[in-house]
Image (cartoon, helix red, strand yellow):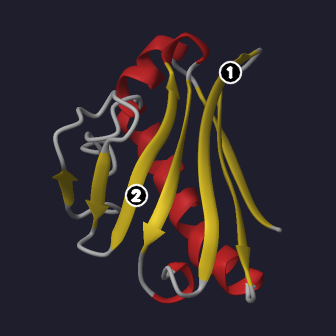
Amino acid sequence: MGRCYNNIVIDASIEAVWQQIGNFHDMSWAKGVITSLVKVGPASGTEVGAKRILNDAIHETLVSLDSSNYTFTYSIDDGPDAIAKSAVDNYLGMVNLSESSTGVLVEWSSSFTSDNEKAVTEFCDPIYMALLGALKNSLR
């Protein structure tokens, strides 16, 4: 099973970070990384089953959301190249916030099955790092 893992510490309250990232349909904080987000279906961005299409290419579904523990999971259902549904199975991404002595630790990880795990990791890790950087910048 393949895995990706990235993290960042943000000097802000956990509530402020969650307010930025906790709505699956709002990635306005990710300027320069997410150029478009299309909501799909009737579910709101805080309801399990919410769907979105990022950058006209990456189809995702909210699998779980736990606001009291500052965490959510989502699946990637289809996308370009290494994350196309023909190339990867069981892609589950997770965002988790926790308080640390220096701020809020934001962890962005994923697990998946693929015949080319390296290609999936090389595709996803730079995106996760860019998203974490944009999140931190949005809270300055």
Where 97 sits versus 95, above or below?
Answer: above
Q: Which label sits in the foreground, 2 or 1?
A: 2
The amino acid beneath tag 1 is Ser
Task: Please tell me which residue is depicted at 75% across the width and 83% down the height of the picture.
Answer: 118
Q: Secondary structure at mark 1?
A: strand
User: Residue 123 is drawn in which quadrant?
Assistant: bottom right
Q: Secondary structure at mark 2?
A: strand
Residue 97: x and y, percent?
Answer: 62, 26
Whether residue 31 is visible here, answered yes or no, is no
Residue 53: x and y, percent?
Answer: 28, 62
Where 7 sits versus 38, above or below?
Answer: above
Q: Earlier in the sequence, mark 2 or mark 1?
A: 2
Disc 1 designates what residue? 98
Question: In the image as oriented, which residue stretches furthest toward the right?
Answer: 1
Which one is nearer the viewer's eye here, 47 or 57?
Answer: 47
Disc 2 designates what residue? 60
Disc tally is: 2
Residue 17: x and y, percent?
Answer: 46, 24
Which one is nearer the viewer's eye here, 42 or 26?
Answer: 42
Task: Please tell me which residue is depicted at 73% across the width and 72% down the height of the picture.
Answer: 113
Circle 1 packing at 10 Å, graded few (<14), some (14-19), many (20+), is some
